[in-house]
Image: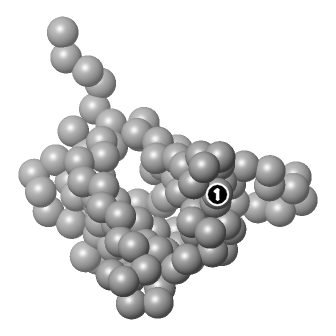
Amino acid sequence: MTSSPAWRLIVAKYQDETESGGNHHIYYKLLNANGTPAANVKLLVDWKGRWLWDQPAVVVTDNNGETNSALWSILHPELKDGPYFTFVKDQPSDKVSGMGLPVNRHVNFLLTFQYG
């Protein structure tokens, strides 16, 4: 049995405040099935508790298959309440959730997706 092609998370890396260089982002790298950069892929960044009038962020990969989105909301590690989740928009995709700024520390999440 084979699964249907989809964007699969193949690498997820967390950068704590000593590694993030003061940034507070989700950094994306998207690869085609053959490992080449995937340009013009839309990713949705949404968060729990978003007001209906507010819109989730949509970011688009460049020619290097890369894009990023800033994070602004705090998470409380003891509550495991990371508000952010993300996935490839309008295509089958793995979903990454639970992201945020632990106790308001500037951290990054580096996510690599590959189609296959």
In the displayed structure image, the side of residue 75 where residue 51 appears, left or right:
right
Quarter of the image with the C terminus is top left
**Is 97 in front, or is 57?**
97
**Is 33 in front, or is 46?**
46
Residue where numbered disc 1 is placed: 76
Q: Is residue 91 above or below residue 15?
A: above
Residue positioned most to the top: 1
Q: Quadrant of residue 64?
A: bottom left
Q: Residues within 10 Å of mark 1 (few under 14, many from 20)?
A: some
Quarter of the image with the N terminus is top left
Question: Measured from the top left, where is residue 99 in percent x and y?
Answer: 53, 57
Residue positioned most to the front: 78
Q: Residue at x 64, y 57 (%)?
A: 76
Residue positioned most to the bottom: 21
Residue 57 seen in render: no
Q: How many marks?
A: 1
Amino acid residing under circle 1? His
Q: Residue at x 67, y 66 (%)?
A: 74
Q: Quadrant of residue 84?
A: bottom right
Q: Residue at x 80, y 50 (%)?
A: 49
Residue 97 seen in render: yes
